[in-house]
Image: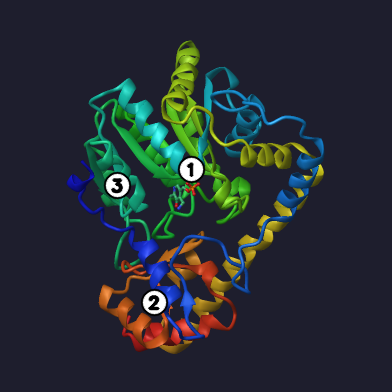
Amino acid sequence: MFNALKPQSQDKILALMGMFRADPRPEKVDLGVGVYKDADGRTPVMRAIKAAEKQLWEAETTKTYTALAGEPAFHAAMAGLVLGADYPKDRLSALQTVGGTGAVRMAFELARIANPDCTVWASDPTWPNHLSILDFMHMPRKSYRYFDAETRAVDFDAMMADLAALKAGDVVLLHGCCHNPTGANLTIEQWAAVADLLEQTGAIPMVDIAYQGFGDGLEADAAGTRLIASRLPEVMIAASCSKNFGIYRERTGCLMVLSDAAAKETTQGTLAYLNRQTYSFAPDHGARLVTMVLSDPTLRAEWEAELEAVRNGMLGLREQLAAELRQLSNSDRFDFLARHRGMFSRLGATAEQVETMRAENGIYMVSDSRFNVAGLNEKSVPVLARAIIAAGV
Ligand code: PMP
């Protein structure tokens, strides 16, 4: 039977990682995979996570099963983080998931159970896994224009024009902050206009928030999500703890669903059912650490301080790169790099230019010219800037 299998197309970012590893040049620069790296290229375990692990090791007396949908304390901690302390408890259902990817998958599953005809609208471009999961599930999808290739900002008029075709019960996938892959984000006024449109059409927002704290700060990065949650009766939010807690391999995420209070019990039950049918319980370790860090004032302060340093480091690299390019190009046409937020920016280079930078300079970015700002350091920024100009971007 297995002879009938067809090869799957390889994830292009993982393929790039393999090429990078095989490159013998010592000066090579990895700007591909979406993992935070410090100036020495390390992805450290955050201090508060280490401290929580130590406490947990000392205090934990059992590894028995927890709750099918995850611990209520984790749900409450994540809802507080993403939605703010005054989130509507009577309308919130939540599910502990296997990473943010698990939350995205379960959100699609929930939407399909609730409305088998639902179409999911995703930004063009979006995180490629959104689209491949939808295709794998055979769920209808459409894209809305998002990125202006000229200005490298959001083309908001085009986005709203495309979303005008939304139907009641469709799902609109929005990136809560730090848009992957472009780095271009909605302003709060634009979020409000999207909320108006969703209200008028009866479409359901699904916010994917995977980088809270990497853009303008923990609160500012949640502002769009909170606005949507305060305005719309039904909302899905897929949150990842991989990046902002640095616990990538622990696979920790949370799907939060706001519904009518009358539908909460069934919604919560359906979420638990989804975990049960897929893998029963989600992994506990990462979720427990996140709960501890968010609930203990000392650990939380330590975590927030480290996250803030990570964020400011990336902002500094953005400023440095934009300044280098201003000088080299004698223009302000790369200033968008300082305006983008999060770990990624889409440079706007052609696939050939990306290939030239790889071949000539050992700089690895995704072929659509998305690069990871955190893969840079003060020394590699000028190398990248010169390569960008030499490649004719
Ligand atoms: N959504 C987006 C937009 C992402 O970029 C990512 C991470 N690449 C995720 C969700 C999920 O991340 P994870 O499953 O590792 O938590």
Q: Which mark is residue 333?
A: 2
Depth order, front residue of 117/340 = 117
Q: Position of residue 358 (x, y in %)?
A: 37, 80
Q: Residue flagged by tag 3: what amino acid is it?
A: Ser
| Image-based side of 319 in relation to 10, left or right | right
Image quadrant for the N terminus?
top left
State the residue position of label 1.
Answer: 100
Image quadrant for the C terminus?
bottom left
State the residue position of label 3.
Answer: 132
- Are dots 3 and 2 in contact, CB under 8 Å? no
Q: Residue furthest left?
A: 4
Q: Kindly report which numbered mark, 2 or 1, lies closer to the viewer in this rendering.
A: 1
Q: Residue flagged by tag 1: what amino acid is it?
A: Gly
Residue 299 appears in the picture as rendered? yes
Tell me how far mark 1 sits from mark 3, CA to CA.
Answer: 15 Å
- Looking at the image, is 1 positioned above or below residue 245? above
Q: Residue flagged by tag 2: what amino acid is it?
A: Arg
Q: Position of residue 121 (x, y in %)?
A: 29, 40
**Mark 3 falls on what kind of element?**
helix
Task: Specify whether tag 1 is near ligand 1 (CB below 8 Å).
Answer: yes
